[in-house]
Amino acid sequence: MKFTRRGFLKLSGLSVAAVASGLGFDLEATAAHGHALKLAGCTKIPSICHFCSGGCGLLLHIKDGKLVHLDGNPDNPINEGTLCPKAASLAQVAYSPERPKNPLYRAPGSDEFVDITWEEAYDRIAKKIKEVRDKTWTSTEEITNAKTGAKETVTVNRAEGICMIGSAEVDNEESYLLSKLARLIGTPFHEHQARI
Amino acid sequence: MSPSFGRGAMTNSWQDMQNSECFLIAGSNCAECHPIAMKWVNRARAKGAKVIVVDPRFTRTASQADVFAQIRPGTDIAYLGAMINYYIENRLYDEFYVLNFTNALYKISKDFGFKDGMFSGFNPETRKYDYASWAYQLDAEGKPVKADSLDDPDCVFQKLKTHYSRYTFEVASNITGIPVAKIKQIADTFAAAKPGNIFYALGMTQHTTGVQGIRCYAIIQLLLGNVGKAGGGIQALRGEPNVQGSTDMANLNANLPGYIPYPTNQEKTLNDFAAKHGSVQYKPIVALLKAWFGANATAENEYGYQWLPKNNPANMPIQPQFFSKMEEGQFKLLLNWGSNSTVSIPDRKLVARGLSSLEMLVVADIFNTETAQFWKEEGLNPAKIPTEVIFLPAAFVYEKAGSMTNSSRLVQWKEVALKPLNDCHPDLDMLDHIFKRVRALYSGSNDPKDEPILKANWDYGDHEASALKVLQELGGYNDTTGKPIAAIGEYLAAPIGTVSTGCWVYAGVTPEGKNLADRRGNADPTGLGLNKDYAFAWPGNIRVLYNRASCDAQGQPVDSKRKLIWWDPVQNLWVGNDGPDVVDKTKGPDTPEGKIGFKQNPEGVGRLFAATYKSGTVAPEGTAAVVPIRGAGMTVDGPMPEFYEPIESPTANLLHPEVQSNPCAKIVSKEFGNPDEYPYVLTSYGVVEHFCAGAITRNIPWLNEIAPEPYAEISKNLAHKIGVKEGDEVEVSSARGKLVVRALVTDRIQTLKINGKDQETIGMPWSWGFASLSPGPSTNNVTMNACDPGAGTPEYKCCLVNIRRA
Ligand code: SF4
């Protein structure tokens, strides 16, 4: 439903008609109706809060591909529709002007970030992984066998120069690929903020 | 928790909190940091439940409490030890539970000892313990010997009794600053109302004695018989939205996904690995290798075991140590995903030095974080910093499909709600692109070192990576049927080498044509908040872990109002309102398997004393070697919790002055202060409006209006002493750094009496950094990088500082 001037007049007429004590019209009804208008025709898509580990359900109201409203998902049994202030503000991330628009690059010694394409970003990262991996590769090392006390040479296949800090703020599937990618390129040096 | 119960996870759920009769909330300000917990606590309160809060500050959570105690930061083990002592001395424990579901009767080796703050087996050179003497007495078959009664001087129960006899209410009061009568009131209140529930968060873990504090909780809950029951348990209120999931997926150096121990250079072959960790780890690692290397993983090549990089135990840095390794020149490239170390890691100068030593830093995040811009911080000269930095703008949670696992192991799926803003991409796509490019760079190589990349199984779609395909890899496939695994039972029953799963605890989350994480059935017929048809809880959709321990010897619920599971003698099956957490659903309470309450522990019982022990010996299918079945989770700094002062402490250790702090703590910082120069104890915390390092919340205008800047909370006495009023600027300094903030003079912090002397505590929120819409000074300028020896968690919650008018 488009918010036209006629619609607005009809709405105010309605609320004046709904005479309530004191003010002469029912503010609550006006508010509720305005809310209903704003949300009319929206697709409601459930999601999950991105702050504490509660897993409270969000409900995003989307119209024409745009986020119109965000509130708690009443069908999620964890929060039954309620949200705390952090989560209630999550709609502000969707169109935040603070979000970078594209990948950025800072050259050695530079005091600024410059825009780069995804293509260039991926290219630089992949080449750097290969370069550091190749120059810091340890295929074997000598150990003292903890049981026998004997010195032996064992295969360890490690890229000593690469480390990875994963995240407790990304999805399971992403988290898993972080683990998988790190170990496939040869780094067991993979940690994240679960400890801190 | 895993050394006590076998699994590290929160035992019950948010909705289950409505079933509790009493809460001990200590080390968590859940009203601000986990508001959802308060919703369910309040529901229990409406039915008469009691709330006990122990905290250094009178928090918003404390304002809801029936009993509140203010404690000196870092001294929890002292009063918890006194509670254990009191329960034992006054026989307030649940005797049936203690005899049947704990190792109370197990006899401890004569070699075990404890003297003057040290357990037997300490090596002062390595600052580590050898566990050999923390053992059971074993019979001829290698099984633990059990005592006839709890009075046997060798049994665990008596060891516990002796150990905690030193922890009187008076000693605990002198250490913690909590009055004697208050400690007694806490102990009595918590024992009187069952089921009792304990919550903790970072207030408990961010100490050099963090793991042992949680062990105290476990001992108390096992003594009172509160584990495995609706409304009971221990709730680890985790800090980040998917920290349970990211830990399940092993974003930590000691594991592979599904809590498989990470292979070290001592385990040359897959058989060595099984011999070290037990046959229970053999199937998961083979299933994982099959998920990672597909058809290239065969019995002949040990399923690709040799391709995994092996840990060197002598060089296994944890995240707070990464920055030293950069400075020392080992790490040249850091790939950093959604984590803001420049604000969040203690001793920030060290972080800046580390990042400045890298060749390249890659940061993927929603906003341009302080970490990505570390070279811009005041006081650094960018011209001298050679690090190349690439920032990748990431899609936000509702702009991508995927699942997250909440604190209570509930895996919830979400679809894309909005297209990503600008040219942002999901991290999943970034990882997919990066891996494929690296693989292309190596294509055609015959060098054996490149095999893991070239032989990997990596196919999540051609253009955009499909999160569902990844979840299906986690849920697993059965080679025999050629189909996705339908349930965890199918995985458990399958012969080794015939199933693949990326994370075995998630086995069965995606049966053919289904995604159980996306289930929306929210009915709750029992009224217990189990919601069995909503999403999927690992393992096997169990909502209350260890629920076998909620039944009596006949397998019937001990609490008729809160029935979780029971043995059905007609069907010859464990059934119930929840998924039964039993060894085998067909083994009744009169069989050895049917009595087991803690199947993830090698003894099958909850561990009051964390002994070293491996159960059984078998030859796993497909191997010639005879290996143990299951090993026990250990606590590296003692089989029973002992009180140690924080690394920076204003006073001497009352129990053993010659062993002041945890002898095993990992010390990373190089500068320490003493109480003459830095007489006050600082504790850091979060506020409801900001989240962790603030990378997201400090870019949200609403939240910045409510909580615009950090501050230092001080008592009226301290304000008077240093001559400041509310709103004045003060400088807070430690041996490591300083910052200037406004003073908040408050009744929420009181002067404590510690060992006869007045002691002041200062509280500061920490979520600020120099970038974002709302920059502010970082509290981690002053905190200290010294970590718990087991968990590697830094001691953010207490260090010594000075404060003066700025
Ligand atoms: S809405 Fe609040 S309580 Fe719920 S998950 Fe989000 S941050 Fe936690």
Image (spheres, coloured by chain):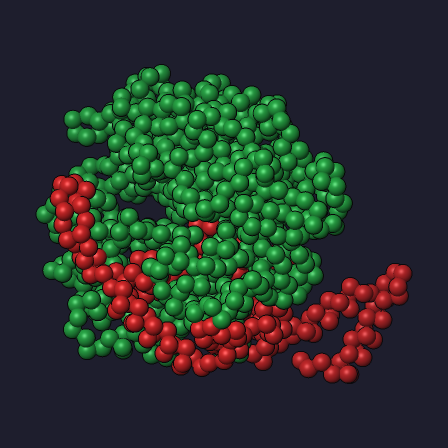
Chain colours: A red, B green
In the displayed structure, A19 sits above or below B349; it is: below
* B404 relative position to A160: left or right: right
Q: Is residue B385 above or below residue A152?
A: below
Quadrant location, the N terminus of chain B = top left
Of the pair B410 and B559, the residue shown nearer to us: B410
Residue B451 in the image: x percent, y percent?
20, 68
Q: Residue furthest left?
A: B624
How far from the left and from the top, in percent, is residue B412?
Answer: 45, 59
Say if residue B390 shows up in the picture.
no
Q: Is residue A171 left or right of residue B253?
A: right
Q: Horizontal placement of B567 versus B397: left or right?
A: left
Residue situated in front as seen by the camera: A74 or A196: A196
Residue occupying the point 48% across, 41% down? B207
- Residue at 29% over, 30% down: B121
Q: x, y (%) of residue B648? A: 51, 38
- Give the quarter of the image for residue B18: top right
Give coordinates of residue A36: x percent, y percent: 69, 71
Q: Locate residue B601: give its quadrant.
A: top left
Q: Residue at x 63, y 59 (%)?
A: B776
Q: Nearer the viewer, residue B601 or B361?
A: B361
Q: Quadrant of residue B580?
A: top left
Asked whether the viewer can see residue B163, the reply is yes
Q: Residue at x 47, y 72 (%)?
A: A109
How many badges with numbers are in the image? 0
Compared to residue B14, the image places residue B614 above or below, namely: above
Q: Is residue B193 above or below residue B59?
A: above
